[in-house]
Image: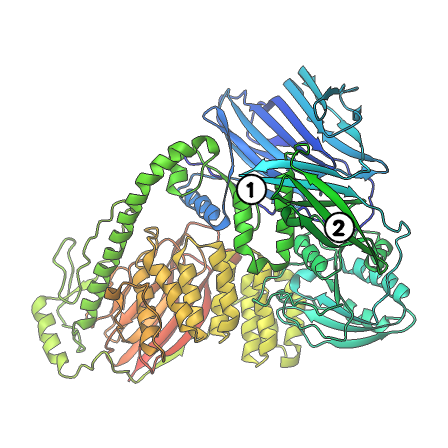
Amino acid sequence: MLRPLIAVFLLSLSLTANALTPLPPIMPPRLTVPRAQTPVRLQSLRIGAEISGGLAQTTVEMVFYNPNAVQLEGELQFPLLPAQHVTAFALDIDGALRPAVPVEKAKGRKIFEEVERTRVDPALLETTQGNNFKLRVYPIPPHGTRSVQLKYVEALPRQEAQRLYRLPLAYGEGIKEFDLELNVHGAVTPPQARGALGGVQFERQQDGYRARVGKSSFQADGTLELALAAATEPQTFVQEFDGDTFFLSEIAVAGDASHPTRLPPSVLGLLWDSSGSGAQRRTEAELAMLDHYFKTVRNVEVRLIRLRDRAEASQRYRVVNGNWAGLRAALASTAYDGASALGAWKPEPDINEYLLVSDGLSNHGEAPFPTLGKGQRLYALNSALVSDSSRLSALAERNGGRLVQLQAGQPAQAAQALLADELQLSDVAATGATDISVEAREPQEGILRVAGRLTQANAELTLTLTQQGKSRTMTVPVSAKAPYHPLAAGMWASYRLHALEADYDLKRAEIRRIGQRFGIPTRETSLLVLDRLEDYLRYDIEPPAAYKDAYAKLKENRLTQRRRIAAQHSDQIVQEFEQKVAWWQKTYPKSAPPKHIEFKKDGGDALEFEPRMMPVAVAGLAAPPPPRAAPAPLAYSRAETRNAERVAKASAPSGGEVPDAGIQLKKWSPDEPYRARMKAAKAGDLYAIYLDEKPNYANSSAFFLDSADMLLELGQRDLALRVLSNLAEMNLENRQVLRILGYRLLQAGEPALAIPVFKQVLLLAEEEPQSYRDLGLAYAAAGQVQPAVDQFAEVLNRPWDSRFAEIELVTLAELNAIVAKAAVKPDTSRVDPRLLRNLPLALRAVLTWDADNTDIDLWVTDPNGEKCYYGNRHTYQGGRMSRDFTGGYGPEEFSLRVAKPGKYRVEVNSFGSRQQIVAGATTVQLRLSTGFGTAKQRDQMITLRLRDTGSTVLVGEFDVN
């Protein structure tokens, strides 16, 4: 059984600029097992700590015993302090702990969802609110055990001349076996222990001190605290890792202890994040902080730039003698709405300093954060619980400023931190070392941490420190013979990752490489545990070190098999395309269908107007699911069909001609309660009413879609796009919601805005061919032909899961149509030349939807009254429906080369769903085209919702003259 465990969280040693506050309480892990009649016990607890300088790594291994006669499932809750971060975990499989391995985030999600689709619940290690983790532990066998191991690292808080390490032991039950080992490296004097366990005795060892405690039937309680002498001289540690020698230097530095105030700006650019997520910030605390800030600055010109889905024009305010009433009123009345495009503004050269007040969550558009001019600084203020503080910190540090985390009840301290001229590392140079990275430009509790990679046995760092306009230098020797530190390489990786956060969109590949090399979760990597070696091979994931030799042997055989599968996949697509070409070339009758009809018998011969689908077996590919039962299609006698064809051939137009046809879309009118109020509103009041209703529907994608539609109808385009962009704020990594946003932007004629949305979808779901197709269609709508062709080629060249039925043929139609109409022929070398043939159509309809594991059907009824759908895929007059898409998203495609005059009804039916749908309904997108694949192609798109299984909605009509 496949049980993946995925860690999806950001390893971020985020930094704060506030003074040390009283240490918060800490709690140990807790396992909850709701269905256990007799409580599951913590049978064994083994804890190891490696402490070097001001850093510690703690390993906690827990063995749980199930005294019940049934298999159980539990959830391990693991609360951590803000400065603590999980770096690894392992589970026992076949009697041994198996460590998690890094995997690209999109691939990890693919594996997770594939297992979920097989109805085997996967396990997930994830963060909850705050810095808490939870891990599903399954199965816990009857009268058996499960073992879990977690590792976390932390920077030790400093109190005066001591560092403090704290270990929670309040597990609250008798533990059969308890073992604790503490190793303090590089210490000159023994640590002082207090709290739980009484007096812990340390023994001198080669590079420091060691203590070990073993107990049986131990009642764990309280917290163990170790006080360690804080070094006053620079300390350096090294670690051999992956063929390189990494070093970590901790340097105690002292600046002006009075925290002098720097020269305030004469012109301040206030970047106020007014997006929808801004409503979650503590804005009252932010305004209180600005009260203190302006009382200190007293006189300054402020240029307010609001950041939403786009930057608004700056507004000027003058603060005189600390009076900022006008600006305060403007900020207090902010309507927080729209997505966050933090890079969508331009620096003004006469602004001395910028203050960014934001949660750091940027989710709209592609614009990178602007580069400030020489001498301009950027400071950042965050008051939100859910935030991207790592990015804010990296942006501020890159631009000579700092991030200030606004704590409740401490506005004065935050203002002081913004205005303080603290000691800063302005430059670091090295000889004998390279790849230098720093924890922060400002000392953290009096310590600068610098890491890098040694190129010589002896190296030297030269640090330049600046405060109040004065600089000084100091040198620090680094030796490859320095004491060992198990975190030296990992700390270098975390410092480098932190610096890359400022340019995340440009540095994604490097972030991914670091995460995979050092085995840490990042924005681009997750941690994964699989049951069997064959599963690592199946998903092309490097297993833990103990399995690599066996993995390499299996992989060699697998590569040969994959090449064979790829070739067979290409041949399969060619055969299916040839069948479609045969359908396209055939002439179908356009007269009235024969009066004599009979139901087609199961197993009977296919009719002449229905091309046979040739079975194509592909070794190694999953077989497609069996087709669902459907009503039998109408069948006509062969003689009647041939006679009707002869009558029709003389007047049938060629496929290259464009019919005189129109598209009438049925106006979508949902019956939601808010809609009546908004429809009755005056044009000038509509947005205000929307804002009034918004808190009631903050998690409803339907509300934002409907509101944006009404604003568009009234010509309020900018406000409509702002409202629509709220979909990007609803769930930062929900590809279904993002797809809705991208489709609706295309419908609104904004492909440039849709492209970055579909790029994000592709990052989240590389395993789904729709991700490439959607992005290709957005590029095509924006006139970017070559990128569109490249995305379509990905759909054609990769073997996909069998649930994505015939998506290659749908994509081929779009690729060939785009190539045929292109003014400059694009490079199609990545596409099999046997597939390059444009098949123009008189009528085409394509249906997609937002929900996975959901079956939506496209129905088209022609002037003959014959319905083309999954149960009748080929009609008498030549209509063709693509294969049924029962597993989610679509597309389903109706094609007709030559259209008989009359009306064609286009309907959408909700057949069924196996998942909970976003916003309680399935959002569907329909694109209707006339003259498809010709220079006269006309498209119309519509978005609507299907709430109930079995519901059918008339979407529109083709009217062919």
Q: Position of residue 800 (x, y in %)?
A: 34, 53
Task: State the residue position of label 2.
Answer: 463
Q: Position of residue 88 (x, y in %)?
A: 58, 37
Q: Toward the viewer: 147 or 184?
A: 184
Res 86 visible = yes
Question: Would you call the spot at circle 2 few (<14 residues within 10 Å), some (14-19), or many (20 or more)?
Answer: some
Distance CA(mark 1)–CA(mark 2)? 27 Å
Q: Is residue 494 left or right of residue 912?
A: right
The residue positioned 56% from the left and 63% from the top of the image is 727
View extreme (left): residue:
639
Q: Is residue 567 left or right of residue 767?
A: left
Element marked by disc 2: strand
> Looking at the picture, which amino acid does disc 1 mark?
Phe
Q: Is residue 575 left or right of residue 796?
A: left
The residue positioned 20% from the left and 64% from the top of the image is 578
| The C terminus, quarter of image | bottom left
| The N terminus, quarter of image | top left
If you read the primary sequence from the N terminus, does the residue marked by circle 1 or circle 2 appear first?
2
